[in-house]
Amino acid sequence: RVTRTMEEQQQRRLPEPAAEERNAERRLPKLDERMFRRIDKFVGGDREWREFKFDVEVAVQTVHPDLATVLKNIHRSDLGLMKSSGEYEKIKQPSKELYEILCILTGDQAKSIVRGVESQCGLTAWGILHGTYARQTLARTIRTYRAAINPNQVSHAGEIITAITKWETCVKEAEAED
């Protein structure tokens, strides 16, 4: 009788699965603009885009790893397919929050691109920004490969570590273009 009573109490304490999912959704942290205050405003430019992209992805990663993964792979993934498969539902709210952040962090031409997304979907805006500023031209590809194959020479021993780090970055960029 005592064990049955204990089992009944434990069963009452266990939340139902649907309630657990709702609580998990509520516990997702919000993308707060305060996390992005140290990121410089992006107004356009290919080089500036790389810095801006990195900074935003790192800030998003700290709060919402699922959204950060999608941001990092936006050039490879099809947003329409993601929406139809149901994967989009768990990042729908953070995507709207990302849109608000992008409105704050962009200016000039970049802001007009973000403003042009009528659905106010942050992933869509991010994808358009990525497509606009991370274009892969033949000249850029050649420059990237040249920097990886023929690194800059170093004149002082103290510059070796910095030069190796820059070279490794160039190699990673060249590999990413494949």
Image (cartoon, rainbow, N blue to C red):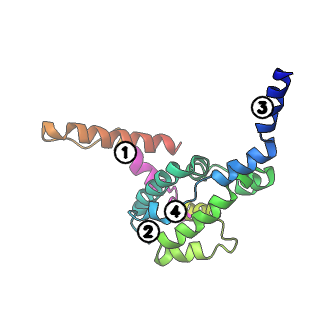
Badges 2 and 3: C-beta atoms under 8 Å apart?
no
Q: How crowded is mark 2: few (under 14 residues within 10 Å), some or many (20 or more)?
A: many
Extreme residue in the left direction: 156
Residue 42 image label: 2
Q: Name the residue under label 3.
A: 10
- Mark 2 to mark 4 CA distance (whole Å): 18 Å
Q: Quadrant of the N terminus?
A: top right
Provide residue 37's location: percent of width, then percent of height. 41, 65
Q: Which residue is drawn at 12% across and 40% down?
A: 156
Q: Which of marks 2 and 4 is nearer the N terminus?
A: 4
- Asked whether residue 84 is in view, the answer is yes
Amino acid bearing label 1: Arg
**Mark 1 or mark 2, whichever is nearer to me:** 2
Asked if residue 138 lies left or right of residue 115, the reply is left
- Mark 3 to mark 1 CA distance (whole Å): 66 Å
Describe the element under mark 3 as helix, strand or loop: helix
Provide residue 80's location: percent of width, then percent of height. 75, 57
Asked if residue 141 lies left or right of residue 66, the reply is left
Q: Which of marks 1 and 2 is nearer the N terminus?
A: 2
Q: Residues within 10 Å of mark 4 (few under 14, many from 20)?
A: some
Q: Which residue is drawn at 58% across and 53% down?
A: 71
Front-lying residue, 114 or 101: 101
What residue range appears in magenta?
A: 132-145
Q: Name the residue under label 1.
A: 146
